[in-house]
Image (cartoon, helix red, strand yellow):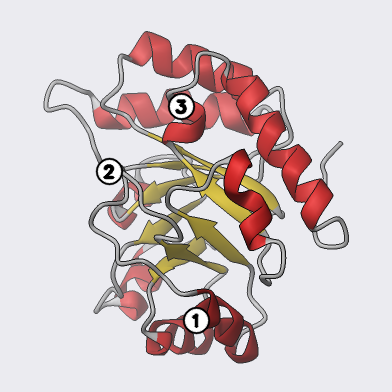
Amino acid sequence: MGKKRSIDSGVYVVLDPFMDQDILMYKLKIILREPIAAVQIWDHFSPQTDNLRLIGKITKMCHEKDVPVIINNHWEWLAETDLDGVHFDLIPGNLRQIKDTITRDFICGLTCSNDLSLVKWADDNHLDYISFCSVFPSATSNSCELVTFETICQAKKITAMPVFLAGGIKPENMHELKDLPYEGVAVISGIMQSEMPGKSVRAYIDKMKMFMPSRFLSKE
């Protein structure tokens, strides 16, 4: 494992490992032709899946493009794979123990809601980024409350860490986000369920360049 990768501004793609693996890997290959910020593997595995083997295939493909790969919640797999980090849905009660156990630097993110104490905790514990869920109603984010735009604005008064927005975001509604302070969007169905995932990634990037040109850092 080399130096710690970082997450750039842009599109943060969430993969559903419950998908047919051939389709998943085919779509990932296409997605990686575009400049994306990171890939997160949702902890939604089929009982028949060899989880670590699949993670290995995903990280190998992403690392060839220098794209960081983050696992949802299962921090322990950082010790057995080349994963770059972990994204927690809830505040872990043992972050110090986790950092002591994983004896290398890794990316750490947290899902936040309207409770700004989560943002404060993430900032106090020097996490790498936060993600607000859910900005719009979404079938894949149905466990998240809707986050107010005011909460997102207040978060940037608390922390300078990158802020990603998730949940129901489509190129068609991104104009509604144009006045918000954020670095990127986290997307699952809008890309992974698309028949043309590369074109879908490009559509999100084009909208970010249109509405937040001074904040979007392209890899191109």
| Image quadrant where one finds the C terminus | top right
Give the farthest residue toward the left. Answer: 47
Circle 2: residue type: Asp
- Marks 1 and 3, the one that precedes in the sequence: 1
Closest to the camera, between mark 1 and mark 3, is 1
Question: In x, y percent, where is residue 128?
Answer: 57, 69
Image-based side of 142 in relation to 99, left or right: left
Marks 1 and 3 sit apart, C-alpha to C-alpha, by: 28 Å
Residue 43 is marked as: 2
Label count reads 3
- Marks 2 and 3, the one that precedes in the sequence: 2
Residue 192 is marked as: 3
Q: Which of 108 and 204 is in front in this view?
A: 204
Question: In x, y percent, where is residue 168?
Answer: 44, 48
Seen at 42% across and 33% down, the residue is 189
Q: Could you say whether the residue bearing mark 3 is in a helix, strand or loop?
A: helix
Seen at 65% across and 46% down, the residue is 37
Circle 1: residue type: Thr
> Which residue bears the numbered disc 1?
151
Q: Could you say whether the residue bearing mark 2 is in a helix, strand or loop?
A: loop
Placement of 53 over or under 6, stated as above or below: above
Closest to the camera, between mark 2 and mark 3, is 3
Q: Nearer the viewer, residue 203 or 172?
A: 172
Q: Residues within 10 Å of mark 1 (few under 14, many from 20)?
A: some
